[in-house]
Amino acid sequence: MMEGGAKKELLRVQHLKKYFQTPAGLLYAVDDVNFSINQGDTLGVVGESGCGKSTLGRTILRLHEPTSGEVLFDGVDIMRLNKAQMKEKRKQMQIIFQDPYESLNPRLTVSQAIQAPMIIQGLYKASDKEGLERRTLEMMDLVGLARRLVNTYPHELDGGRRQRIGIARALALNPRFIVCDEPVSALDVSIQAQILNLMQDLQQELGLTYMFITHDLSVVKHLSTQIMVMYLGQMVEMGTPRQIFENPCHPYTKALLSAIPIPDPAKKMERIQLHGELTSPINVGPGCRFAKRCVYARPECFASSSQLKEVEPGHVVACHLVEHTVDEAGASGLSE
């Protein structure tokens, strides 16, 4: 924390792009994304499958090398670091993967899985069995894994316990920033709440900063400091949970929110059905990528992309309709 209670910026992403070469042409997985996250905050990233959420998280960590752009971590552009420097920086930047079974080596026991990053990063030598065992048990206690499971294998455990191993492995290096790539989507609903509560407790206890990737808006509403909505590789809206849920401005955001189940059988859901053809993310042309599915689309939406525009402090939207509304009536007109 800085003086006066203001939070310090930990991560800034500027004009980040990640394109993949395919036989049909370039696939625009992440296309010119910009945002920042303050120390101790959580950025929720939402959108339908294939919108580029996971690719964005992995590109920030350089698990995918970016096509272009900058990722400033504590003011240092990690895209300019060499292999040795990046290895050192990874102690501070970790990831929790979506599928805890696929992300764990089936040949390693619980203790070996947690110890592996500590040995690779040189925090402990493989011969320091006493130190490794002590640290492993500390991590297991921290994430709520019973010590009696120390020599079990992943296939002997349920999904919740496997994901706790993944969390313990990510925390073993004392990171400051963690990309949480849909960490509960592969778990039973009864287990999801336990893992989410654990992650919130760990954030408070350790001062962690999260980038929480999910397709579940009801989850991200309660976890996030800010919410970013992505569509086909681009950020279309970003704001606080209150701004996104009470004053959604992009037509795609409104459609996502309308799909959240209401726990009241007597209350009718006003679902916004999306129709039309999906824009191909390969060899993307001019125009808004959502235009073909948008009931409000104008000719200009097909001709040129909209730039992000601030509709209220901290709330930005990329939509031609919003641009006209703001220009004509000001931000207050959006909530009418």
Image (cartoon, grey):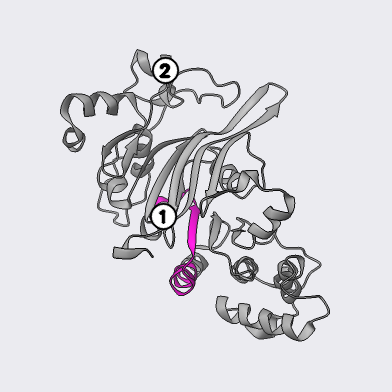
Q: Disc 2 designates what residue?
A: 304
Residue type beneath disc 2: Ser
Quarter-of-image position of residue 106: bottom right
The structure residue drawn at horizontal position 66% and vertical position 83%, both measured from the top left corner, is 137
Secondary structure type for disc 2: loop
Locate residue 187 relative to residue 222 in the image: left or right: right
Judging depth in this view, the residue of 147 and 11 nearest the camera is 11
Horizontal side of residue 7 vs 85, given as left or right: left
Residue at image location 32% in from the left, 50% down from the top = 240
Q: Residues within 10 Å of mark 1 (few under 14, many from 20)?
A: many
Q: Residue 102 got which mark? A: none
Where 297 sits versus 223, above or below?
A: above
Q: Residue 222's image quarter? A: bottom left
Quadrant assignment for the N terminus: bottom left
Q: In the image, what residue occupies the spot 49% across and 39% down?
A: 14
Tell me, yes or no, if residue 271 can be seen here: no
Q: Residue furthest right?
A: 127
| Of the pair 176 and 166, the residue shown nearer to us | 176
Position of residue 251 measured from the top left corner of the image (x, y, whole percent): 34, 32
Q: Amino acid at mark 1?
A: Val
Examine the rendering and report whether any part of residue 326 can be seen: yes
Numbered range of the magenta stretch: 197-218
Report if residue 164 lies within the magenta region.
no
Residue 201 inside the magenta-drawn segment: yes
Image quarter hosting the C terminus: top left
Work out whether mark 1 precedes mark 2 in sequence or the reverse, and give the earlier one.
1
Left or right of 332, for residue 254:
right
Residue 220 badge? 1
Marks 1 and 2, how far apart at CA: 31 Å
Task: Answer above or below: position of 291 versus 14.
Answer: above
Image coordinates of residue 136 in percent, x first then y, are 68, 79
Q: Is residue 12 above or below residue 147?
A: above
